[in-house]
């Protein structure tokens, strides 16, 4: 997906050019006839709230002193938060839009633009609007009642607006099992069609084992559990997407994982698609998600996989 590609490019950008961006920001480096820092905040570490508003709706990211929350309901993806702040730190206006193009961009900004508000303890620090072109190759920023600017991240051909266009579900932390794994008690895998391949992982004598196998391959089991502990969804589905897959979700899952912690809290991952499908549909505690096929293939392991060969 082009959106995922742009996000990956932005992540790479943080690693490759953060030092250069910081140098530019604090030294100015401005030879243009306009201020290249007009969309920047002096100190981003003080920002504790970011709001994105458009005709599509509103997304609020708020820092609660420990972590960022999405619309007050979900933990935010920490990596995306880093990408966002790195992006707005490094982005700069390339040219001011004038003439007939200005009217066109302003009209598009009014119709499809995203208003971005950067807050510090409920005080507005910076506000501007963002819009991209239909081809998702160009991004424009505009302050209220001012001319729009074509903006870029110097040295990179990346669609800057991609990070601003993320939805509530895309901003969410993608961890599937978001709890303390020191509290893990047991895991049960169940196959709808092959129940003889079901397995139960439990802790006994300080070691993990499979109850149905006398001697399990500990290397494979350790690798499997590590993969489960670090499992991430590709993304969460919205209500419209869930409705479009009703015919699939109405059937029993092909594979199901039930995990219990020492406090007897349960966590259920139900996978409805085959790893051979292009889209892997699953639910975590009833919430619909997409899994990558390669990830799903590592989750759906049969009992005999863990046997010592």
Image (cartoon, helix red, strand yellow):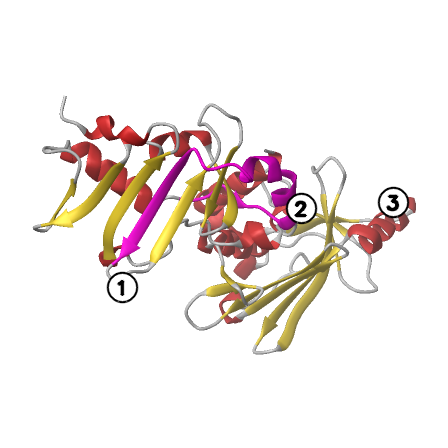
Quadrant housing the C terminus = top left
Region in magenta: 232-261
Label 1 vs label 2: CA separation?
35 Å
| Total marks placed | 3
Q: Residue 280's spot in the image, x, y percent?
A: 50, 33
Quadrant housing the N terminus = top right
Residue in the picture at 55% in, 58% down: 25
Return the residue at label 2. 240
Q: Earlier in the sequence, mark 3 or mark 1?
A: 3
Q: Earlier in the sequence, mark 1 or mark 2?
A: 2
Return the residue at label 3. 101
Label 3 vs label 2: CA separation?
36 Å
Q: Residue 38's spot in the image, x, y percent?
A: 68, 62
Determine whether 194 is above or below 185 in the image: above
Residue 263 image label: 1
Task: Answer few, some or many: residues within 10 Å of disc 2's Cα (few below 14, many 20 plus, some between 14 and 19).
Answer: few
Mark 3 secondary-structure assignment = helix
């Amino acid at each position: 997906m082009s959106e995922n590609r742009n996000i990956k490019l932005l992540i790479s950008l943080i690693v490759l050019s953060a030092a250069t961006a910081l140098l530019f920001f604090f030294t100015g480096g401005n030879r243009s006839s306009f201020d290249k820092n007009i969309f920047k905040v002096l100190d981003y570490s003080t920002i504790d709230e970011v709001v994105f508003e458009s005709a599509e709706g509103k997304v609020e990211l708020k820092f609660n002193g420990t972590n960022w929350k999405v619309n007050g309901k979900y933990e935010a993806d920490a990596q995306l938060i880093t990408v966002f702040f790195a992006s707005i730190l490094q982005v700069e206006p390339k040219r001011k839009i004038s003439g007939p193009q200005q009217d066109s961009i302003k009209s598009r900004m009014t119709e499809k633009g995203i208003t971005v508000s950067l807050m510090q303890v409920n005080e507005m620090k910076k506000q501007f609007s963002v819009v991209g072109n239909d081809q998702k190759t160009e991004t424009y920023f505009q302050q209220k009642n001012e001319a729009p600017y074509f903006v870029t991240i110097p040295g990179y051909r990346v669609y800057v607006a991609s990070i601003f266009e993320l939805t509530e579900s895309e901003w969410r932390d993608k961890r599937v099992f978001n709890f303390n794994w020191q509290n893990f008690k047991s895991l049960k895998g169940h196959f709808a069609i092959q129940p003889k391949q079901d397995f139960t992982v439990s802790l006994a004598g300080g070691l993990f084992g499979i109850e149905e196998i006398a001697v399990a391959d500990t290397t494979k089991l350790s690798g499997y559990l590590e993969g489960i502990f670090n499992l991430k969804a590709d993304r969460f589905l919205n209500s419209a997407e869930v409705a479009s897959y009703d015919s699939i979700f109405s059937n029993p899952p092909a594979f199901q994982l039930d995990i219990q912690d020492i406090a007897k809290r349960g966590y259920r991952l139900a996978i409805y698609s085959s790893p051979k499908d292009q889209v892997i549909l699953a639910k975590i505690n009833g919430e619909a998600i997409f899994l990558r096929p390669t990830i799903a293939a590592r989750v759906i392991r049969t009992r005999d996989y863990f046997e010592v060969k």
